Amino acid sequence: MRLKYYIRGIGAGILLATILLSISFFFGGGYKNKELTDEEIIQRAEKLGMVMEEKESKEGDEEQSEESSENEEAESVDESLSEENQKPEEEMTIDEFVDEAEASNAAETKEDSTVSYQAFTVKGGQSSETIANNLYKQGLVDSASSFNEYLGELGVDNRIQSGTFYVQVGSSYDDIVALLVNKEARTTTPPEN
């Protein structure tokens, strides 16, 4: 029975404290929102150690900021024009990538009349890491790990087709990737010069 009286006493105390605090808050007036004038805000800021700019330097800064904003706008227009003309590689489809690589390969072939090709075979079920190592062993890429990472970045490491094809010695990574993912780009006989 005593526990019941203690709980009632605690409840009554909490209720009484809440009422007293509400009354003191309402009539205390210390927490009322009052509007500060600009002068009061400036005085308060100076009291806290803030420094005000002079009007003359403000005018000079405004002129400089206008000039810099005009320059930034001109630069942003130039950047947007150059970005429109260049399509990022991430947005290219595999077919566009293959076409671009074939076009660059054809241009390089025309420039160099002594082109040599090397046969390369991809067996079904080989991982991109194994293929990269085999390309490195044959001297077709300069680094197996770099080429394998490049395949992963392009997202074609699991789209490599099996078969035998001829790689032009000195081909770029893009040209080799185009051959790996596009079965139609491969030949079973060495291309004629």
Image (cartoon, grey):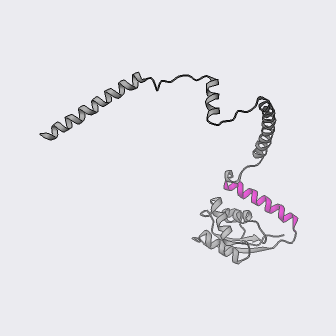
Q: Quadrant of the N terminus?
A: top left
Q: Residue at x 70, y 75 (%)?
A: 136
x and y percentages locating residue 94 in the rendered image: 67, 56
Q: Is residue 109 left or right of residue 161?
A: right
Q: What's drawn in magenta, residue-wise?
A: 93-112
x and y percentages locating residue 58 in the rendered image: 77, 31
> Does 110 appear above or below 38?
below
Q: Is residue 27 left or right of residue 118?
A: left
Magenta stretch prevailing secondary structure: helix
Q: Quadrant of residue 156?
A: bottom right
> Does 155 appear above or below 80?
below
x and y percentages locating residue 89 in the rendered image: 70, 54
Residue 18 is one of the magenta-drawn residues:
no
Residue 105 is one of the magenta-drawn residues:
yes
x and y percentages locating residue 100 in the rendered image: 75, 56
Pick whichever, 85 or 3, lies toward us: 3
Q: Residue at x 71, y 56 (%)?
A: 97
Residue at the far left in the pictured view: 1
